[in-house]
Image (cartoon, rainbow, N blue to C red):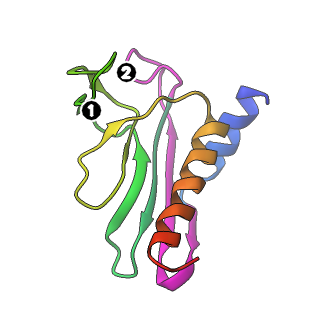
Amino acid sequence: MDNKKDIDTLLNLDGVVIEQAGGHWTKFEVRQVPKSEMIPHGVRYSLTLHDRDGKRIMGFDNAHAVKGKNKGKHQGRKTYDHRHRHIEDEGVHYEFVDAHQLLTDFWSEVDKMLNALGLD
């Protein structure tokens, strides 16, 4: 896929809210920013799944740094691209490949979460 087209697709989702099963909903916040060491792809994003009360229950973002807790190359290193696996999760590293993969991974996790809640 064309990386520029993928980024444009992601940017076009800014402000989109999509209803999901059981009153849950997804929200997209996406902005183009200058490329930097922390955001080499030049896109600040927050893709989130919320419960019917508006609480974020899962998401992918790079709006803040998280300290790596996992073993391996990200251990102890602050990383910006990350995901929140559940309500209490402070975030774990996410390897941003491209916008297409980010969207694929996000929707896969939305499906898993809704399925686990019996809302598929």
Side of 62 relative to 78 (left or right)? right
116 in relation to 10, above or below:
below
Q: Nearer the viewer, residue 6 or 114?
A: 114
Q: Position of residue 32 (x, y in %)?
A: 53, 34
Q: Nearer the viewer, residue 83 or 61?
A: 83
Q: Position of residue 63 (x, y in %)?
A: 34, 40
Q: Secondary structure at mark 1?
A: loop
Whole-number angstrom distance, CA of label 1 to CA of label 2: 9 Å
Q: Is residue 55 magenta?
A: no
* Residue of label 1: 65
| Quadrant, the C terminus | bottom right
Q: Secondary structure at mark 2?
A: loop
- What amino acid type is highlighted by mark number 1? Ala
Q: Position of residue 77 (x, y in %)?
A: 24, 20
Mark 2 neighbour density, 10 Å: few (under 14) some (14–19) many (20 or more): some
Mark 1 or mark 2, earlier in chain: 2
- What amino acid type is highlighted by mark number 2? Met
Q: Nearer the viewer, residue 93 or 30?
A: 93
Q: Which residues are magenta?
A: 16-42
- 1 and 2 marks in contact (CB < 8 Å): yes
Which circle marks residue 38 in the picture?
2
